[in-house]
Amino acid sequence: MLETRSLVLLSVLLCMSLVSAFVEELDDSFMETRAADDTWLIKFYAPWCTFCKQLDPVWHQIGSELKSQGSLVNVGKTDATTHTGLAKEFRVRGYPAILMLKKGVKYNYSGPRTKDGIIDFAHRVSGPLVRSLSSLQLFQHAMNRHVVMFVYVGATSQLKGNYTSAAEELIAHTYFFSATKDILPKAISMPSLPAVVVFKDGTYFTYTEKLDGDLKTWINRERFPSYFKIDSYTLYAMGESGKLVVLVLVEEKKQCEESLRYKGLVERVSANHRHLYSRSFYFGVMEDSDYISGLVMGEVTVPSLIVVNLANDGYFVPPAGVETERQLMDFLNGVLNGTIQGQGGNGVAQRLRRFVYNTKDTLMPVFRQAPLLGCFLVGFPLAIGALFCYLFRKAQCAKDNEENIRLLAPPAQHHNKLTSKKSD
Ligand SMILES: *[C@@H]1O[C@H](CO)[C@@H](O)[C@H](O)[C@H]1NC(C)=O
């Protein structure tokens, strides 16, 4: 009896040591003590964060899977609230943050927090920046696996140098391939070599510096398919593309006839009028409208149509019903030429409204379940705030009067500025 028990204890201990062998707990000394050439996948967590806790078992699986695959990627995690030096070094802003460190360069993971998504990220970043496709079979294999695929075609050149340096930055988001002309299918024609080509939406496009601008910007802009199912992580990441996103919001489960009609309409316009819209818009379907509710600060009707500008949290809704291709195109043209007024945005007033909305959204469930706690949560900061205001006013009154009259002029809002980056 005693023996079985100690056996159990022993195996539990063994298991625990195995688990911790897959994932290392890191602290502030990490940057000094690590070997310079090692590649690391690190999760930054906070003890109170529930999303971090949900990620814990996934993280152990990732650790063990990468080990068993013989990957050279080391997996670690660190409590960012106690090891603040390390979190600062990696510029961690929210939890959980997933980052990779390779040859001193840090890569931020922004995709869905699934095992497969994160392992793919680890493989992509830890592998070569540009993967050479040496045969037609390899090319076709890659084509089957990637919905959007960038390929450099040709010999060494300045363009190849630019391509590699773009890869250095964007490998966190997409794969980069290279090939010679002779291994590509004969049907693929290129105006000249060398060339950078993107394969997507059942066709391919060649990059031209004159029309498309800087290569890195172009890759960032083109790294999504023009019509696809979008989740909130992807939508957020699409902000950097500088394009507006035309979204059909539909039910998560059983979709009604109208949803299907909207989806068909948007897909048709994205495919049939690519030359008109592909430089300005992405198109997609979204089943989870939480992100959009947050953006418009209210319930969204499902199914419905919305155009979002992720660069400034602005959005556009059709002024009337959209039934036909023509009506959808009129709406999109109106958005592009400014006749349809944008809403939302990230001006001061909008930010304030969003803050109030988010706070309400967080506190409402608390009120419903525990009204007293809710009152305390709201009342306590209010009381403190009021006290401060009172003391401040008292101090201010003593000063000169002119000092008091200072208007807070809100900065102008830029609804249509597509190229502006998220400001926070
Ligand atoms: C490579 O990038 C540089 C700097 O961005 C640019 O001036 C040059 O034209 C690019 N070369 C090619 C071949 O695209």
Image (cartoon, rainbow, N blue to C red):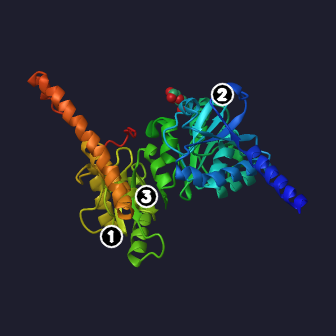
The outermost residue toward the top is 400
Q: Nearer the viewer, mark 3 or mark 2?
A: 2
Please give left or right for residue 28 compared with residue 19 in the image.
left
Cα–Cα gap, marks 1 and 3: 16 Å
Please give left or right for residue 256 compared with residue 25 in the image.
left
Q: Is residue 401 visible?
A: yes
Q: Which mark is residue 324?
A: 1
Q: Quadrant of the C terminus?
A: top left
Q: Label 3 is placed on what type of residue?
A: Phe
Q: Which residue is mark 2?
A: 29
Q: Measuring 21% from the left and 32% from the top, which residue is drawn there?
A: 391
Q: Secondary structure at mark 2?
A: loop
Q: Label 2 is placed on what type of residue?
A: Ser
Q: Which residue is mark 3?
A: 283
- Are the residues at dot 2 and dot 1 in contact (C-beta closer than 8 Å)? no
- First-in-chain label (3 vs 2): 2
Residue 351 quadrant = top left
